[in-house]
């Protein structure tokens, strides 16, 4: 059994081979950018009005101003402003030559083609050319995850296509003779397959693709068949169940038989101790315990970071400092233990939790806290760090 830290270092040492592809910008949401984006234009590309009002010269103290032009957004002004002149301008309109100020409409009066200032406005009300982005600026960085705001920036650069890292293709196998598919009648001794759905959802949420989803009874031949098949077509294979030391836990010996090099078979973490990780060529393989909380937690702690690194993204979890609202205790401390919690307004509230089969507890949680190896309790009022989920 190795520590969490050792397991993480083994995973970090694994070489990944992110591949690049070019896709339409409208399909790039949540993808990982494979190139730096350097601006070829200024943003804004011209000085424009930030408000509806009147463009004029700031050194012009005339009592009233002749309106020589009306400038809506998208219109190129034709008149340069002289003393005693202004242009009626809309938000986003291009500033006419000579203007360096816009006075808002609310403090003006207009009559017979003239504008008079009747109130006070001390603001310039101008968006200057290049004040957001200048030509040559680095606007998006390689390895960034493309959220709606990054998509908007890329579009503002005039891009129609963008280079991103290819999404890894993931194969999922859920093992267990007691597992049946949703929609079937539940009989004695049976449980519905939830791990296939939770792992698939976590894979998709991470930005990867689910290539294949399979279930297998506790039979070494069937397990071998599906592992062998998915090893040939997937970048990463996730196997739920069959990884411990019971008489029907066939996954580790089958992996070895298929030429998978196992880098570890147990981690000092709770839940998820009998986690297996191996490689065959460039394909990664994880065997995770069948209890659904174990599956979820191991994915978050170990699989997700590797999956994102396969896409060129060095991901770090969001961790928030909080104060423990009540004590957590345990009897054995040889493993680091994770507990579901609710973080709210700086306070951390433990959730009633019955162990690694209690997946319903996670529906109430927005984070996990860790009780480190060798530590038996977290006292009320202690500072803790919540890993957001």
Image (tube, helix red, strand yellow):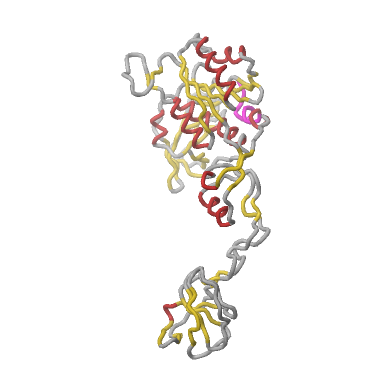
| Closest to the observer, 184 or 300 | 184
Query: Residue 241: horizontal and vertical position, in percent?
Result: 49, 19
Asked if residue 121 lies left or right of residue 315, the reply is left
Count of marks, rendered view: 0
Quadrant holding the N terminus: top right
Magenta segment's dominant SS is helix
| Closest to the observer, 149 or 68 | 68
Provide the residue span drawn in magenta: 1-9
Task: Report whether residue 337 is seen.
Answer: no
Q: Is residue 41 above or below residue 252?
A: below
Asked if residue 355 lies left or right of residue 136, the reply is left
Task: Report whether residue 205 is seen.
Answer: yes
Q: Is residue 79 above or below residue 188?
A: below
Asked if residue 187 lies left or right of residue 165, the reply is left
Q: Is residue 389 above or below residue 227?
A: below
Q: Residue at x 40, y 27 (%)?
A: 358
Tell me if residue 7 is in the magenta stretch: yes
Q: Residue at x 56, y 81 (%)?
A: 79
Q: Residue at x 56, y 54 (%)?
A: 153
Residue most toward the bottom?
63
Tell me if residue 146 is in the magenta stretch: no
Query: Residue 279: horizontal and vertical position, in percent?
Result: 64, 22
Query: Residue 290: horizontal and vertical position, in percent?
Result: 47, 21
Asked if residue 232 lies left or right of residue 184, the reply is right
Q: Quadrant of residue 234?
A: top right
Query: Residue 365: horizontal and vertical position, in percent?
Result: 42, 37
């Amino acid at each position: 059994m190795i520590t969490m830290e050792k397991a993480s270092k083994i995973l970090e040492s694994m070489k990944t081979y992110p591949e690049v592809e070019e896709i339409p910008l409208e399909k790039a949401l949540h993808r990982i950018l494979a190139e730096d984006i350097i601006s070829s234009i200024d943003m804004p590309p011209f000085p424009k009005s930030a408000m509806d009002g009147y463009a004029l010269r700031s050194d012009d103290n005339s009592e009233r101003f002749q309106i020589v032009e009306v400038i809506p957004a998208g219109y190129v002004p034709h008149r340069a402003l002289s003393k005693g002149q202004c242009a009626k301008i809309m938000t986003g309109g291009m500033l006419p030559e000579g203007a360096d100020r816009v006075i808002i409409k609310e403090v003006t009066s207009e009559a017979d083609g003239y504008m008079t200032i009747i109130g006070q406005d001390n603001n310039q009300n101008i968006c200057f050319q290049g004040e957001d982005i200048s030509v040559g600026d680095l606007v998006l960085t390689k390895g960034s995850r493309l959220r709606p705001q990054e998509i908007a920036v890329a579009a503002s650069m005039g891009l129609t296509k963008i280079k991103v890292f290819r999404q890894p293709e993931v194969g999922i196998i859920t093992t267990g003779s007691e597992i049946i598919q949703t929609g079937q009648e539940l009989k004695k001794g049976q449980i519905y397959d939830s791990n296939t759905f939770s792992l698939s959802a976590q894979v998709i949420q991470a930005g990867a693709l689910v290539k294949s989803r399979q279930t297998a009874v506790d039979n070494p031949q069937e397990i071998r068949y599906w592992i062998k098949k998915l090893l040939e077509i997937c970048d990463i294979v996730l196997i739920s169940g069959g990884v411990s030391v019971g008489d029907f836990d066939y996954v580790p010996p089958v992996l070895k038989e298929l030429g998978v090099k196992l880098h570890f078979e147990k981690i000092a973490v709770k839940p998820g101790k009998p986690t297996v990780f191996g490689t065959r060529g460039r394909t990664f393989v994880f065997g995770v315990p069948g209890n659904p909380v174990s599956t979820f937690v191991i994915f978050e702690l170990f699989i997700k970071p590797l999956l994102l690194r396969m896409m060129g993204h060095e991901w770090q979890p969001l961790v928030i400092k909080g104060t423990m609202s009540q004590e957590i205790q345990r009897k054995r401390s040889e493993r680091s233990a994770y507990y579901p919690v609710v973080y709210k307004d700086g306070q951390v509230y433990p959730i009633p939790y019955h162990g690694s089969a209690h997946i319903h507890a996670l529906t109430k949680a927005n984070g996990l806290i860790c009780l480190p190896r060798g530590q038996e309790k977290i006292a009320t009022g202690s500072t803790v760090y919540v890993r957001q989920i």
